[in-house]
Image (cartoon, helix red, strand yellow):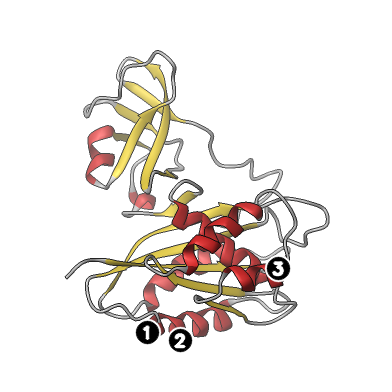
């Protein structure tokens, strides 16, 4: 029986000053996934930052990617997802939820819509039109969360956007790991240096204590730069917590 994949997008579940962001809410949903389904990863997606758009801190949403080898039934995931978002979303937020299977025709429109969400202000009606045939629902407040939830599904389904905030236990790795250890976890290490050799299995990677692979080509990819013989470091890193608090972790 072939594997089936389902995308579950959440958005706008927190409020300014809260310690519990949407990313964390999505990651905690893994504990409520029905038997027979396996979480492949959770991906954070960045949407347009504009003064005309109300958002908590960075206008991001998140998508959980779930696989199953059994008969596909999105309905088995909708009820627990709705219950989770309604119980965990904070009062004053505008939660939205979107679910779509990888073989649903709606994904094409969701992908097109999602890239618009990174470039211009979009509306709830546009989100509903894009999600026709998939599940899209608001669970309080203005309902604007349906926009980010739909965008999270579309961007993640594209395979070329976002960073993983959960994948193969990435939070349990040491600050310095080998390329081979990352490969065993399904994370590909890729050099961004123009002239660098490809990272070797025995090479070490300094994650700066913040291992967050990118979603590139439908895979978890860790971009790195060389810093010494057999030593690499990740590009970027966690935001300065004294300036702004990142809650997805």
For residue 137, above or below residue 117: below
Circle 1 crowding by C-alpha within 10 Å: few under 14, some 14–19, many from 20: few
For label 1, the SS is helix
**Could you say which is closer to the camera, residue 208 or residue 232?**
232
Q: Position of residue 109 (x, y in %)?
A: 54, 63
Mark earlier in primary sequence (1, 3): 3
Task: Determine which residue is flagged by label 3.
Answer: 15
**Residue 79, numbered circle:** 2
Circle 2 crowding by C-alpha within 10 Å: few under 14, some 14–19, many from 20: few
The Cα atoms of the two marked residues, 2 and 1, are separated by 7 Å
Residue 169 shown left or right of residue 131 in the figure: left
Residue 58 shown left or right of residue 198 in the figure: right
Question: Where the N terminus falls, by quadrant?
Answer: bottom left
**Are the residues at dot 1 and dot 3 in contact (C-beta closer than 8 Å)?**
no
Q: How many marks can you see?
A: 3
Query: Is residue 191 among what the camera can see?
Result: yes
For label 2, the SS is helix
For residue 224, above or below residue 75: above
For label 3, the SS is loop
What residue sits 34% from the left and 34% below the top?
Answer: 189
Task: Determine which residue is flagged by label 1.
Answer: 76
């Amino acid at each position: 029986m072939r594997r089936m994949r389902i995308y579950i997008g959440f958005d706008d579940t927190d409020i300014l000053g809260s310690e519990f962001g949407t990313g964390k809410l999505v990651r905690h949903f893994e504990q409520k996934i029905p038997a027979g389904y396996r979480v492949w990863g959770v991906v954070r997606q960045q949407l347009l930052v504009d003064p005309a758009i109300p958002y908590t801190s960075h206008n991001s949403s998140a998508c959980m990617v779930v696989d199953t080898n059994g008969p596909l039934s999105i309905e088995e995931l909708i009820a627990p997802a709705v219950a989770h978002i309604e119980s965990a979303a904070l009062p004053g937020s505008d939660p939205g939820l979107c679910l779509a299977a990888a073989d649903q025709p709606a994904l094409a429109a969701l992908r097109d819509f999602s890239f618009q969400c990174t470039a211009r202000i979009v509306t709830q009606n546009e989100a509903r039109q894009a999600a026709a045939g998939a599940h899209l629902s608001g669970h309080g407040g203005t309902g604007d969360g349906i926009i980010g939830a739909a965008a999270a599904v579309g961007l993640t389904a594209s395979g070329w956007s976002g960073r993983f905030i959960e994948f193969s236990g990435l939070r349990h790795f040491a600050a310095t790991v080998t390329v081979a250890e990352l490969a065993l976890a399904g994370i590909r290490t890729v050099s961004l240096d123009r002239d660098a050799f490809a990272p070797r299995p025995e090479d070490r990677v300094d994650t700066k204590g913040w291992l967050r692979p990118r979603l590139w080509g439908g895979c978890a990819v860790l971009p790195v730069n060389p810093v010494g013989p057999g030593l690499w470091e990740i590009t970027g890193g966690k935001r300065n917590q004294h300036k702004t608090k990142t809650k997805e972790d």
